Image: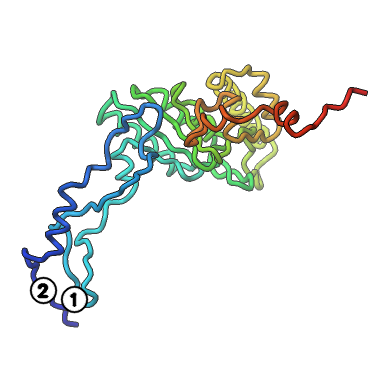
Amino acid sequence: MASIPIPPLNPKDPFLSKLASAASISPNLIQPNKNDDTPPFLDLFDTPKLMATPAQVERAVSYNEHRPRKPPPDLPSLLLHGRIVYIGMPLVPAVTELVIAELMYLQWMDPKQPIYIYINSTGTTRDDGETVGMESEGFAIYDAMMQLKNEIQTVAVGAAIGHACLLLAAGRKGRRYMMPHAKAMIQQPRVPSSGQMPASDVIIRANEVINNRDTLVKLIARHTGNSIETISQVMRRPFYMDSIKAKEFGVIDKILWRGQEKIMAEAASPDEWDKMAGVRVADGI
């Protein structure tokens, strides 16, 4: 099958002139964040500009459209270039391997610049509670975070459940963030399916799960500022937290909600709302 001939580029093409002009005045949007209170790549751009170079476009014969000659780089590489590690899956061995490798690479590149970990993970379980990874996967990422020389900033987007909640709380104090509609949850580790395992082996596995639970309780208590007794009590059943409750519990330090401080400062208290609405509190019986 004969290939479709591609006409050569015309240096005097007015489209290329406009494209070169736009590229020359376009700022580089991939820059270190100037606001220390906000992780990178969360700012909104009011006036986005075209980003392209004439050397990367060609004209197609069929529809006279311009398309890149080379495929764009993969998104994980772009995020890594911005010192962002994204955990968007349950903590299975493949995820643990990639996350730890990225953390070590970023420390090797620059041990002084902060690392941003974005978390949307159900931990070592799925949404339905089924175990998909060993508890050691979460502990491995946690230990890697603690060993790094870099400052670690964590951001919860979507969900941070189980060991993922521990990773969220393990960020640097004052630099742990959460999206307004994200959720966090801590729960006891679950015993993996035993199948046809002998009874003695089931007991050994159960004891290991209990040891992992005790370790998880101690670590969450350390990073949230709560007592071990408090964490043990709330972890008897799945303990869900929205962004406000997670901040009160000590899992995060700030909610990434644009204008939230102003809105909350202007909001009336419940007593004031009752007073304005003419609601009287009934006397105790």
Colouring of the image: rainbow
Disc 2 element: loop
User: Which of the 4 image quarters holds residue 10?
Assistant: bottom left
- Residue 97, above or below 149: below
Q: Seen in the image, is 110 located left or right of residue 197?
A: left
Where does label 2 land, which residue? Answer: 7
**Residue at position x 63%, y 44% in the image:** 129
**How many marks overall?**
2
**Residue at position x 58%, y 20% in the image:** 221
- Residue 24, above or below 278: below
Q: Seen in the image, is 15 located left or right of residue 269?
A: left
Q: Position of residue 235 (x, y in %)?
A: 67, 29
Say what amino acid the circle numbered 2 marks: Pro
Nearer the observer, 236 or 258: 258
Find residue 61 and name its label: 1
Q: Residues within 10 Å of mark 1 (few under 14, many from 20)?
A: few
Could you give the CA–CA distance between mark 1 and mark 2, rounded to whole angstroms? Answer: 8 Å
Q: Seen in the image, is 65 located left or right of residue 188?
A: left
Q: Seen in the image, is 217 located left or right of residue 77?
A: right
Say what amino acid the circle numbered 1 marks: Val
The answer to whether the residue labelled 1 contacts the one labelled 2, judged by CB atoms less than 8 Å apart, is yes
Which is nearer the N-term, disc 1 or disc 2?
2
Q: Is residue 68 visible?
A: yes
